[in-house]
Image (cartoon, helix red, strand yellow):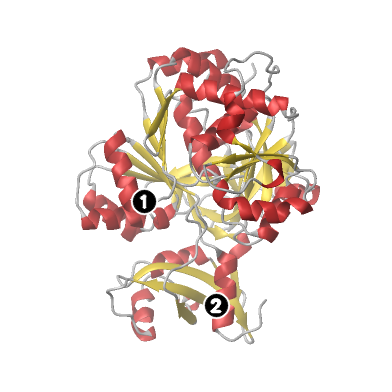
Amino acid sequence: MEFNLADLFEDIADAIPDRDALYTEGRTLTYRQLDQRANRLAHHFTAAGVRAGDHVGCHMTNGAEYLETMIALLKIRAVPINVNFRYVRDELRYLYDNADLVGLVYDTEFADRVAAVLPDVPRLRHLLAVGSGDGLPGGALRYEDALRTQPDDRAGFPERSADDLMIIYTGGTTGMPKGVVWRHEDLLFGGMSGGSEPLAKPEDAGPRAAATAPLVMFAAPPLMHGTAVLAAFIAFLAGGKVCLIRKYSGEGAVRIIQEQGCQTMMIVGDAMAMPIIEALDAAPQALPSLQIIASAGALLTQPVRDRLQAHLPNLFIVDSFGSTETGHSGAGVTSGRHFTVNDSTTVLDDTFKPVAPGSGVVGQVARRGHIAQGYYGDPDKTARTFVEVDGVRWVLSGDLATVDADGSVHFLGRSSICINSGGEKIYPEEVEAALKTHPAITDAVVAGIPDARWGQKVAAVLQFHPTAAAPSPQDLETHLAPLVARYKLPRFTHVVPRIQRSPSGKPDYRWATETLTQAAGLDQP
């Protein structure tokens, strides 16, 4: 059996051609229309010389064109590459080059950045521009012009396989991004859990979608973040409708949920939940269609959960646990940082043996089975992250955890951002969660900065509620005392008007470290 994402999408489109597939910015496409537009684009790429295995960048904000481009590339066995639209020249130069891009589909609002990088990436030879803005560097074509001249059938597309690839670039919060390479079949079962219900065989996809009541999924994060892409494909596999928003806001999110009857919503942590809360604070309403909010990539803190629940008491809130390398590993329905993990996930100690439940041993979360292949073009990092133990291949997620007596996993934090202060390991996420329980604090990011005595000390960038009185250091220490051990308390804080996060809502620890180090008058690490 060969599970290929393009094959599955086409089977579903044939089974439910007239069902709504995609809504974005006032425009709806049925499965037939989405498939036909992707076919046109696939034919265009083929005519432009894009071949199986070639890499094409998606440098866009959310819109139909993003998913059309991905589907089109999968149809011809080419590889879509997500591009962070906040990147500037040097970061884009690195990613375009590292990913070996031969093509690029970009929003015209980023034309100046694209033009600045093009001379340094001669391999990049074909560009399509989305939108009506000016700026067509490098002989770029208008996206709609490219589609207009091509047929909308599937004639001439190559035979596909489960071994066709997708690459998801991740990182950039603690270092330069890296491309995580996935086989289609592994991404389907490892990243998407086989769909809303695991598929037993590929030919089940169409009939199952036809027999399923339509799901309306609001994939709120930017599609350049893997979470949103996986959420979109999970909805497609269920024969559902995907709703997108180009520029995320609380008011815009509430409007889409109301207008489209969204039943589920995917977000990334507090940074995406808070705008919804603020919109509902300003104009309370029930949102009766919304049943589930799932967060991936960043955990929801208890104060944010409580405020969501106060507005939407029947809402089911869940944190999804995993990483770009591991795929979906488990879920938690409380903010206690405890997760129920799937059968493929465990915690391994320093000798790569499973941590005994209740032992208190800190190990690294690992997953086997349907996992990524490695990092594109980086065999050394691949060897460090993907290990073989007794004939079983594991991916080490970088997440540190203990295993409770009942077998649940207690997530501590990422090893790459762990603070070592006088030999004590301190996990920023734990301190951040405690800080955000203070009523005056709307956001916080914690990082370690140099300290002559302890090596590192805990420091925090804080964002206060605009109408709240700023707490004194003593007030803050008193508030935190029952929540975290004394050695974990921030020894230096710096207040900013707004904390910088990635477009998906993840903390930018590199920015936080630089900001805190500079504010403390220290040399940059």
> What residue does disc 2 label?
516
Percent x, y for residue 390? 74, 39
Vertical placement of residue 11 versus 411, above or below: above
User: In front of the other: label 1 or label 2?
Assistant: 2
Front residue of 185 and 158? 158
**Residue 457 visible, this angle:** no
Percent x, y for residue 265? 38, 41
Front residue of 219 and 142? 142
Q: Which mark is residue 334?
A: 1
Q: Quadrant of the C terminus?
A: bottom right
**Circle 1 SS class:** loop
Q: CA distance from mark 1 to mark 2?
A: 31 Å
Going by the numbered disc 2, the residue's amino acid type is Leu
Mark 1 and mark 2 lie on one chain; the one further toward the N terminus is 1
Percent x, y for residue 220? 42, 44
Residue 17 lies left or right of residue 509; in this view the side is left
Residue 252 lies left or right of residue 374; in this view the side is left
Q: Quadrant of residue 57?
A: top right
Percent x, y for residue 473? 39, 84
Identify the residue at image location x=41%, y=73%: 497
Going by the numbered disc 1, the residue's amino acid type is Thr
Identify the residue at image location x=51%, y=77%: 459
Q: Quadrant of the N terminus?
A: top right
**Residue 27 visible, this angle:** yes
Identify the residue at image location x=53%, y=34%: 67
Q: Badge 2: few (under 14), some or many (20 or more) residues near its Cα, within 10 Å?
A: many
Vertical placement of residue 124 versus 211, above or below: below
Vertical placement of residue 161 versus 123, above or below: above
**Circle 2 SS class:** helix
Counting labels gives 2
